[in-house]
Each structure stands twice: as structure tokens, then as C-alpha cells.
Image (cartoon, rainbow, N blue to C red):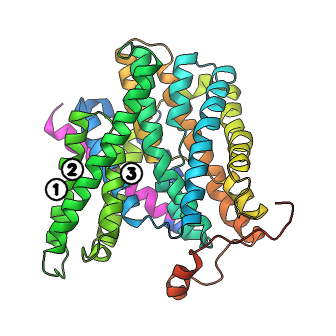
Amino acid sequence: MTPERLGLLWGVTVFAGASARLLAALSGLPGVVLLLLSGLLIGRSGLGLVEPLDLGQGLATVVGLLVSLVLFDGGLNLRLPGDTIKATVLRISVIRLLLSLGAGLLAAHWLAGLNWSVAAVYSAIVLATGPTVVTPLIQQIRLASPLGDVLEAEGLVLEPVGAVLALLLLELLLGNLHGWRELAMGLLARLGGGVLIGLAAGWLLSEGLRRLRPDPSVGLRLQITLGVLFLMFGACEWLLPESGLPASVAAGVVVGRRPSTQAAQLDEVIRELARLAITMLFPLLAADVSWAELSPLGWGGVSCVLVLMLVVRPVAVSVATIGLPLDWRQRLFMGWLAPRGIVTAAVASLFAIRLEQAGVLGAGRLQGLVFLTILMTVGLQGLTAQPLAKVLGLVDPEPADAAGSESEAAVESLPVATDPGQ
């Protein structure tokens, strides 16, 4: 690929993403939906201006680094005050992991027509909600605490788990792993190793930031942060593939909580960079999807996604929240809001390439079904989240900026359900 063509690819991609952002700001429509549609327009399904495969092996590298930035930003801003909220997130994550995996496998096979192995990979890929989508929605509708904290944390916990599990299921499908014991050991090694490396890198980074003099421009702090983050991610992927995702979250959590790191100064800059990464990634990855991959799914694919949205998610949340101090309104909203985000799209695109190279049937259908899941969940839930929150009385009456310290006090404990039947 010539340098001129490569420059045009990135120019068209960033321009399409920025135009989608502008249209979202003017129309009030969910930005992620417009980003995906812009990718379909400039890619195989539309004008054919962008072909992600032209990046070759560099595609996986670019996507991985940008995704690590997005997850680091999520960890940096993660707030889980109080043992009750932490226990709630852990319980929801574990129960959803078990129920959603099995139900997604059955739905993808029986309704969407994927073979069992590819259906298992799909179920793991779409396991987690996307914090890159959930967080903007929560901020837009001013969702009252602590529900917003629980929803954000759920995505950050399950997103790396789903990506690592999907990779191991892919390796099992391709014959690189032998048996479920190797899969379980690989899952523990990648998650545990990634978290440990992330904690160590986050501590070293926070120590370095703590020793710097306050920098009004935040320039040096940003450069050091990106240097450590990208080096950590590259080392993780070299040692344990896909372990860079949990490492990025863990590093962000440590830096965000270590004293005297001036994390507040970094927060807005990192957040803007993460938004830029999303603006670049969504159109780039969506450009790889063709209508030829979406159209064969037909009503079976739509039914599969609807089952995940209307049956699997509400049932999993209902089971996971039994005995927890959440009232029926909070459970209903949690059972509805589960959009998939950028990590889901990235993993699907990269895995589809590997499956195609290996000659596995169903690679295109896997990618098409994942993007159909993203489009439907983000579109339907993004448009209805704010009206539903208002009807249920879950909107914070005061804007986040005016709430001040009251918002911090509000998340110290979960509201106790008043209905004796809850």
C-alpha cells in the first residue's frame, strides 16, 4: 500500500468520524450509531473508500493501542465507593458471565445459524456492555448514583474477561489449544497476569507522576502516561496475548486512586484522547463489514439479538440482583441498558480476519452478527434510555456540575428497596 493511499485511508476515516460526531451533536442522536453508519458508508458496504485490511498486520497493532487508551481512561474514572456497590458489581458480573455465555451460545446457534464453535466465540465477544457507550449515555441522561457507577463498572470488569475468553475459544476452535483445562488455565493466566502487570505499571506510573512538579500544560504528564501505557500494553501482548486489556484497566484504576498523581489534570486530556480513539476506531472497523455479511443473517440474526436484549439480559440481571438493595425501577433499567461498544467491534473484526485466514466457515457471519448486535443495542437502547430513566424517576434532578460534593455522598450506599417483596 502506497503512503499516499495510507494517508487517504486515515484522512477519510477521521473525517467520517468527525462528521458523525458533529451530526450527533446537532441532532441529539446517539453518536456511536452515527459512527458505525459512517463506517458502513465509507467501507465495503458503501463507497469503498476505506479498506481496513490494507493496513495488514498493523491493523491489530493500531486497534490494540487505541483500545488500551480507551480502557485506561475507563479505569482512571472508575469510582466504586462503599462495599455494597463493590459486592453488587462483582455479583452481577459473575452471574451474568455464566448465564449470558450459555444463552448467547444457544441463541447464536439456533436463531442466527452459526455453528457451535463460532457461536461460542460470538457469545464471549458480546458478553460485556461497552463502557465507551454506557458512560456517555449516563452523563447525557444524568443518571442518579449509584446506578451509573454500577453500570460503568460492570462493563469495565466484563469487557476484558469477554475479550480474553473469546480469544481462548478462538484458539480452541483453530486447534491451538487442546481441551477445556488448557482454556481455563489460559484464562486465569491472561487475566491474572494482565492485572498484576497493570497494577505494577500503574504504581510505577503514579510514582513518576507524583515526583513531577505541577505542570500547568499537563504535557509532560500526558507523554509519560502514554509512554508507560503503550509499553505496558505491548509487553503484555508479547508475553500473554489479550492480557493487555485487563492490564490497561488495572493501571488506570491505580493511577486514578494514588495520591498526588494529579490525576484530575490528566483526566480531561485522556478522556479527549479516548474520544478521538473511538472516533477513529468505529468507522475504521465498521468499514470492514459488508452487506453481504449482514443480509444472510436475516430475521434469524435480528431474533438472536432481540433475545439477548429482551430475555437474556433482564433475566440475568434479575437473578444477579436477588437479595441486593436495588428496587424494581433500578433492576428494570439495568435489565434494559446493555449496549455493546468499541472493544466488542475491535475483537470481532480481528477475530474474523483470523478465521478467514484459517478457512473457517462462518467468519463473515460472526462479524456481521456482532456488528448487528452493536447497531441494535446502541440504537434502540441509546434512543430509549433517557425517556425510560425519566419515567422511572432515576434522573438526578441537579446537573452533575451543580451537585458538587452531594454526588460523592450519594454513592456511599445503595438505596434500599421499599417494597417488602423485593
Q: Locate residue 227: give its quadrant.
A: bottom left
Residue at 25% of width from left, 37% of height from top?
A: 237
Q: Position of residue 64 (x, y in %)?
A: 30, 42
Q: CA distance from mark 2 to mark 3?
A: 26 Å
Q: Residue 16: which numbered mark, if any?
A: 3
In the image, taking residue 46 as reference, residue 421 lies left or right, namely: right
Quadrant of the drawing holding the C terminus? bottom right
Q: Secondary structure at mark 1?
A: helix
Residue 153 against residue 414 in the figure, above or below:
above
- Marks 2/3 in contact by CB < 8 Å: the verdict is no
* Residue behind mark 2: 230
Residue 95 against residue 112 in the figure, above or below:
below
* Residue behind mark 1: 227
Q: Position of residue 113 (x, y in %)?
A: 63, 19
In the image, taking residue 416 as reference, residue 221 lies left or right, namely: left
At label 2, the amino acid type is Phe
Q: CA distance from mark 3 to mark 1?
A: 28 Å
Q: Secondary structure at mark 3?
A: helix
Q: Which residues are magenta?
A: 1-24
